[in-house]
Image (tube, helix red, strand yellow):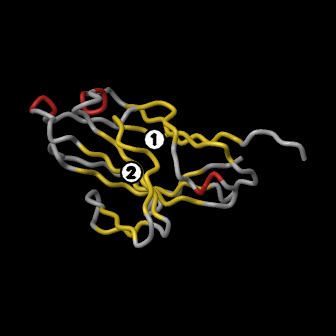
Amino acid sequence: VNIALGTTAATNRLNVAATGIVPGDTIQRAVTLSNAAGNQNLSAVTLTTAATTTSTKLDSDATNGLQVVVDRCSTGWVEAGTAPAYTYTCAGTTSIVLASHAVVGANMALANLSSLTAGNTDSLRVTMTLPATADNTFESLSSTVGFTFTGTQRTATDQ
């Protein structure tokens, strides 16, 4: 079983920082989730996100703090913009992998993944939004959020 992220570059922008955001801003990052090197199907993939530095209201306020959505593009995301203001468009079909959720969460089930099948990859876009309802107490705060994708092997069968 082998679930992996793309190498740091256009196939993995999760490590690109965003600064100077204000309420209503969005941050988009692309990442490729791959089971291409795996020789077994997976039963599930989950996402756990956590503050990797001192937590602030940006990651601890479930209502007014950062919100995350993950979606998938069937043909791969087309990147535009320059760091850190990347944007992504999809010429194919998009599907929701993780519906809007507070940015920090444990073992969040991911849906609509082709990488559950050995040999496949998924082109994902992670969008974080600071809600327009975030007030001045969010000013000058910073957070670093780590993303951990976990693949669960399929159930054993008779062979």
* Element type where label 1 sits in the image: strand
Density class for disc 2 (Cα within 10 Å; few <14, some 14-19, many ≥20) is some
Three-letter amino acid code at the position of disc 1: Phe
Task: Please indicate, yes or no, whether residue 12 appears anywhere in the rendered image.
Answer: no
- Tell me: 138 left or right of 32: left
Quadrant of the rendered image containing residue 46? top right
Measure the C-alpha gap from mark 2 to mark 1.
Answer: 10 Å
> Which badge, 2 or 1, is on the more N-terminal residue?
2
Residue labelled with disc 2: 126
Three-letter amino acid code at the position of disc 2: Val
Q: Are marks 2 and 1 in contact (CB under 8 Å)?
A: yes
Say if 43 sits above or below 60 in the image.
below
Label tally: 2
Q: Could you tell me residue 26's position as x and y percent?
A: 24, 51
The answer to which of 118 and 31 lies nearer the viewer is 118
Residue labelled with disc 1: 147
* Element type where label 2 sits in the image: strand
Quadrant of the rendered image containing residue 61? top left
Q: Residue furthest bottom?
A: 91
Q: Residue furthest left?
A: 136
The residue shown at (50%, 39%) is 47
Q: Residue furthest right?
A: 159
Q: Could you tell me residue 66's position as x and y percent?
A: 28, 38
The residue shown at (59%, 57%) is 114
Task: Please indicate, yes or no, whether residue 61 appears anywhere in the rendered image.
Answer: yes
Say if 152 sits above or below 33 in the image.
above
Q: Could you tell me residue 88's position as x and y percent?
A: 34, 64
Q: Could you tell me residue 81's position as x and y percent?
A: 27, 67
* Tag nearer the camera, 2 or 1: 2
The residue shown at (28%, 51%) is 27
Q: Which mark is residue 94?
A: none
